[in-house]
Image (spheres, rainbow, N blue to C red):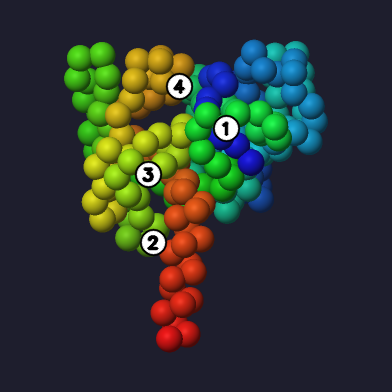
Amino acid sequence: MFTGIIETLGTVQSADRSSSGNISFWIESCLSPELKVDQSVAHNGVCLTVEEINGLKYKVTAIPETLQKSNLGQLKPGDLVNLERSMVLGARIDGHLVQGHVDGMGLCEQADQFGESWLFAFSYPELIKHITVPKGSICVNGVSLTVVDSNPQRFSVAIIPYTYGHTNFSTLKKGDYVNLEFDILGKYMAQYFLHYKTLM
């Protein structure tokens, strides 16, 4: 479980695809010396398990199911990824409850600066049945954000200078794909009402 508050950025050192379709990544990060093998770390919002650690680098692997639903398969050496270790029970939750289980990818349709802030708009395909609500929570590339405008298969978020400078939003441009995880409370409510209507 995560909060969507990014701790730092990591840099992809290598991305090697195996014959089975898995991709193993070596990530360089200042967090590496503090990690442990078997620990969960969110990469652009995707929960992956640390397999090896070598100095400032560590290894994780994404399986085909993960690659199909996220933008991890597009990562190449030199790319920046948002990193967050799992939350600690008893600590403040500054973002919202994030599972690290991406629902699918969204397409960046707008990336405009207004003064010292930025407005990003994203669309997502109809096969992703989840919704957003104004002032609700959404996780984009692992970043906990508040929805500004909400429309069917489209929403926008405002990014403050701190978030822009400390995440890979600073490299995000129109036409890029991002990982989306919708609010878990909203997903449970949607399923509840779907089953409730079926029983009526």
Type of amino acid at the residue the image marks with label 3: Gly
**Is residue 74 visible in the rendered structure shown here?**
no
Q: In this view, does 125 lie above or below 88?
A: below
CA distance for labels 3 and 4: 21 Å
* Residue 169 x %, y %: 38, 24
Distance CA(mark 1)–CA(mark 4): 18 Å
Against 57, is 64 above or below? Answer: below
The residue wearing badge 1 is 93
Residue 151 left/right relative to 160: left
Is residue 56 rendered to the left or right of residue 37?
left
- Indicate the secondary structure of the residue bearing disc 4: loop
Q: Which of 24 and 38 is in front in this view?
A: 38
Dot 2 amino acid type: Lys
Q: Is mark 3 on a helix, strand or loop?
A: loop
Residue 118 x, y percent position in the rendering: 27, 23
| Residue 193, image x, y percentages | 44, 71
Residue where numbered disc 4 is placed: 167
- Nearer the viewer's eye, disc 2 or disc 3? 3
Q: How far apart are marks 2 and 4 (CA)?
A: 27 Å
Badge 1: few (under 14), some or many (20 or more) residues near its Cα, within 10 Å?
Answer: some
Verify CB contact (< 8 Å) between mark 2 and mark 1: no
Residue located beneath label 3 in the image: 136
Reading the image, the residue beneath label 2 is: 129
Residue 42: which quarter of the image?
top right
Q: Which of marks 3 and 4 is nearer the N terminus?
A: 3
